[in-house]
Amino acid sequence: MESEKLLQRVNYLNVVGNLAPMLGLLGTVQGIIAAFATLGTQAQGANQQALLALNISMALWTTAVGLIVAVPAVAFFYFFRNRATNIILGMEAMTIELIKGLRSVEVYEEENG
């Protein structure tokens, strides 16, 4: 149960690391859609370079922010997962040593007098 508690909190970093790039990609798609909408709906769509550049900039920024969030989250996930695994292995080794010691102990029942 303790190992599950340790790993449960670490898995939140994994979720953030996986979702952040997808959300960044969603923003990129929205920015590109807006850029093409600008080209298609403006009276002089091809001449609206500033608005087109702004939409593409928004698309790239959302991708960058998604990656800026995801990369450290994934790095910390692996770091903390490895630390949790080491703690769990240490607990298991200690438990095995305690069980070995208890196997050689004789149990005496107390007499009720």
Image (cartoon, grey):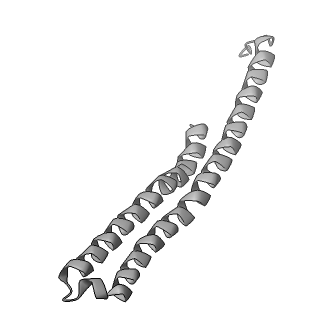
Q: Position of residue 112 (x, y in %)?
A: 71, 16
Q: Nearer the viewer, residue 48 or 86?
A: 48
Q: Residue at x 49, y 64 (%)?
A: 66
Q: Position of residue 80 (x, y in %)?
A: 66, 49
Q: Position of residue 45 (x, y in %)?
A: 25, 84
Q: Residue at x 53, y 46 (%)?
A: 8
Q: Nearer the viewer, residue 31 or 6?
A: 31
The part of the image, by quadrant, that contains residue 42 is bottom left
Q: Nearer the viewer, residue 35 or 102?
A: 35
Vertically, is 36 above or below 12? below
Vertically, is 20 above or below 83? below
Q: Position of residue 43 (x, y in %)?
A: 18, 89
The part of the image, by quadrant, that contains residue 88 is top right
Q: Residue at x 60, y 38 (%)?
A: 3
**In the rendered view of the protein, which quadrant contains the N terminus?**
top right
98 sits left or right of 4 in the view: right
Vertically, is 9 above or below 24? above
**In the rendered view of the protein, which quadrant contains the C terminus?**
top right
Vertically, is 44 above or below 80? below
Q: Nearer the viewer, residue 62 or 18?
A: 62
Q: Say how many tags the image has.
A: 0
106 sits left or right of 34 in the view: right
72 sits left or right of 110 in the view: left
Q: Residue at x 71, y 39 (%)?
A: 87
